[in-house]
Amino acid sequence: MMQNTKNAFTLIEALISVAITAIGFAGVIAMVSTSNIVMSKSIDKEKLKFQNTEILEVLSSDQANIMEYNGKDLSNCSNLTINVGKDAQLKELINWCNKIKGEVGEKRTIDKRTIRVEKKLVKGSHVYIVSVELSGKDDKSVFMKRVMYAQ
């Protein structure tokens, strides 16, 4: 009678190790896929925040015409209107509208893309309260409000 004295893996042991390795790789692939989705959503929200900040900065520097921006809806670029002689403000509005459309797509019925400006008297000083709300794909929404002393 001959005995096998070789130390080696059997076919079943090799198949089990391959299966365990495949399960491990599947977990890593699923984790990377989920990470990509989360990163994409985060990038979209950052784009909206950047646009919101840009709008607030321009309004802060253009306080002489700040009320021209009140009540503007940036969802339809061709319907934007402004008072006669305010071409620079209209150009800014159209620019923002096009940027938002390019970054997050066409406006859906649930999206908001509005600018609101209020002038109030607070403790004897006039202030502008500016709020900008932008939303886009994946139901991402960014709302920013800034209070500026009127000059």
Image: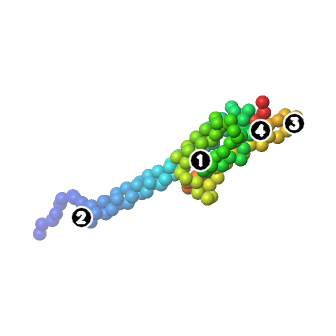
Q: Nearer the viewer, residue 151 or 9?
A: 151
In the displayed structure image, the side of residue 145 where residue 119 appears, left or right: right
Q: Residues within 10 Å of mark 2 (few under 14, many from 20)?
A: few
Residues at marks 4 and 1 touching, judged by CB atoms closer than 8 Å: no
Residue farthest along the left direction in this orientation: 1
* Residue drawn at point x = 12 percent, y = 66 percent: 2
- For the residues labelled 2 and 3, the Cα–Cα distance comes to 85 Å
- N-term-proximal mark, 2 vs 3: 2
Residues at marks 1 and 3 touching, judged by CB atoms closer than 8 Å: no
Percent across and percent down for residue 18 are 30, 60
- The residue to which callout 4 is attached is 128
* Residue drawn at point x = 61 percent, y = 38 percent: 91
Mark 3 or 4: in front is 4
110 lies above or below 46: below
Q: Amino acid at mark 2?
A: Leu
- N-term-proximal mark, 2 vs 1: 2
Residue farthest along the bottom direction in this orientation: 1
Q: Amino acid at mark 3?
A: Lys
Question: Judging from the image, what secondary structure is the residue with disc 3 in?
Answer: loop
Q: Residues within 10 Å of mark 3 (few under 14, many from 20)?
A: few
- The residue to which callout 1 is attached is 77
Mark identifier at residue 11: 2
- For the residues labelled 3 and 4, the Cα–Cα distance comes to 13 Å
Percent across and percent down for residue 105 are 53, 51
Q: State the quadrant of the N terminus.
A: bottom left
- Quarter of image, res 116: top right
